[in-house]
Image: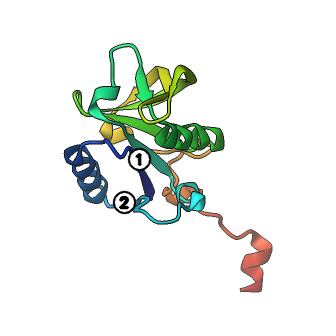
Amino acid sequence: MKVYVSKSNHASIDDLLEVRTMVEKEGHETLEFTGGNYDPNLIKRADVIICIPPRSSIYDDHIRLGRGIGSEVVGAKERGQRTVVYDYSSKKYLAPDEILESENADWKFDFYRCTKWNEIKQDELFNIGTADGMPQDSPLNRILPNQDELDEI
């Protein structure tokens, strides 16, 4: 599974290392923008997006996101990709339900506001089902040949 790590320029390096380590321990590939020309196709290749905002962005009733990571979260949700925000204080992953443009329009720290979310437990973070509810890597989801194809073999 491919995991895109969307990080604020003001995110804690400790939080970033913790998320990267967790993804690698789970055996997944980490994708992230590392500078230079931004490639919007990189995030589109991911199965899961983990957003790491600055520690000062998470409040009891909302999460503030700058324009960069906020735009990535909004786009990923529109494409139907599993998207979560890492909450450093609780070590939880929060799946945004409602993201609104902020009235403050501070593009670095408060361009978007997430006001509703669901908690995703770490052990459920990579359990992404298919239309029939089976995990993507389940052998039951492999396309099996039909009888005509078997006869040709």
Give the amino acid type for the residue marked by disc 1 in the picture.
Answer: Phe
Q: Secondary structure at mark 2?
A: loop
Image quadrant occupied by the C terminus: bottom right
Which residue has dot 2 on it? Answer: 28
Which residue is rendered at x = 64% and y = 39% of the image? 78
Image x and y of residue 127, in percent: 43, 45
Label 1 crowd (10 A; few <14 / some 14-19 / many >=20): many
Would you say 38 lies left or right of 80 here?
Answer: left
Q: Residue furthest top?
A: 61
Which residue has dot 1 on it? Answer: 126
Which residue is rendered at x = 59% and y = 57% of the image? 40
Would you say 137 lies left or right of 78 here?
Answer: left
- Image quadrant in which you'd find residue 34: bottom left
Q: In the displayed structure, would residue 124 be above or below residue 89?
A: below
- Image quadrant in which you'd find residue 108: top left
- Pointers 1 and 2 in contact (C-beta within 8 Å): yes
Of residues 71 and 18, the one drawn nearer to the viewer in this rendering: 71
Q: Secondary structure at mark 1?
A: loop
Indicate which disc residue 145 carries: none
Give the amino acid type for the residue marked by disc 2 in the picture.
Answer: His
CA distance separating discs 1 and 2? 9 Å
Image x and y of residue 151, in percent: 76, 81
Can I make out residue 51 in this image?
A: yes
Image x and y of residue 38, in percent: 53, 60
Say whether disc 1 or disc 2 marks the residue closer to the N-terminus: 2
Image quadrant occupied by the N terminus: bottom left
- Image quadrant in which you'd find residue 110: top left
Q: In the displayed structure, would residue 118 be above or below residue 33?
A: above
Of residues 102 and 148, the one drawn nearer to the viewer in this rendering: 102
